[in-house]
Image (tube, helix red, strand yellow):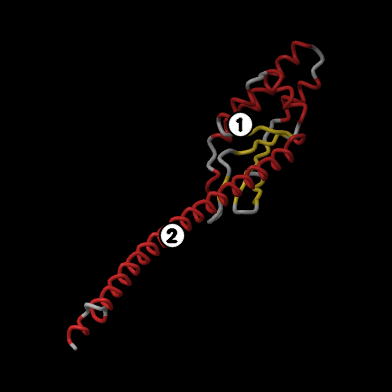
Amino acid sequence: PDAVLHYPGGEDVFIDAKMSIDAYKHFVEAEDDASRKIYAKKVVESVKGQYKNLMGKDYGRFVGEGRTAVDFVIMYVPYEGALRLAFKEEPNLWTEAFNNKVFITSQENLMAVLKVIDIAWRQYQQAENQKQVFLLADELLRRVGKFIGEYQKMKRNLETFTKSFEGLDTTLAGRQGILQKAH
């Protein structure tokens, strides 16, 4: 990749800057519509060829230990006009690339895309943290419930024991108790 952005929390984003300038240069310099049409098609072919090239690359080897990466690569096209032309000529080009895990963008949108990724990761992390809090709260409630159950069981056993013990007092020292009979 041309750039690897290391986001906080161990996430990486790969950016590959791709675009053949020749086709776009010829398009801009063309003096007639027929030539422009031919070079416009070549611009589309260039963008398409570049994104298809990126589809096959294994960026996993650039991910450091303990880090993760988004499951797509950002294809940065430094020529805004060329990218607009390609999207105009082939309106499904961006969607086709995105469905193949290549996010095509230009200088106009690159920073916004990176910020959106950052926001999405933060929200994901917050959701994961909330999930952990809920799991811990659930475990705490389960343990408190078990404690209360054991406490109530012990309290009943203690009450039963106390009644039995008081019954022994009556048997031992009551009016009809063992001590009275023994005198």
- Element at label 1: helix
Of residues 76 and 22, the one drawn nearer to the viewer in this rendering: 76
- Quarter of the image with the C terminus in it: bottom left
How would you rate the neighbour count of disc 1 (Cα within 10 Å): few for under 14, some for 14-19, many for 20 or more?
many
Residue that mark 2 sits on = 143
Q: Quadrant of residue 109?
A: top right
The amino acid type found where label 2 is placed reads Arg
- Element at label 2: helix
**Numbered label tally:** 2
Q: Is residue 81 left or right of residue 18?
A: right
Residue at 20%, 81% (x, y): give it: 178
Q: Is residue 150 above or below residue 88?
A: below
Place of residue 59 in the rendered image (x, y in percent of width and height, measured from the top left): 55, 44
Place of residue 90 in the rendered image (x, y in percent of width and height, measured from the top left): 66, 19
Residue that extends furthest to the bottom in the rendered view of this protein? 183
Q: Is residue 38 left or right of residue 159?
A: right
How would you rate the neighbour count of disc 2 (Cα within 10 Å): few for under 14, some for 14-19, many for 20 or more?
few
Q: Is residue 29 above or below residue 133?
A: above
Residue that mark 1 sits on = 51
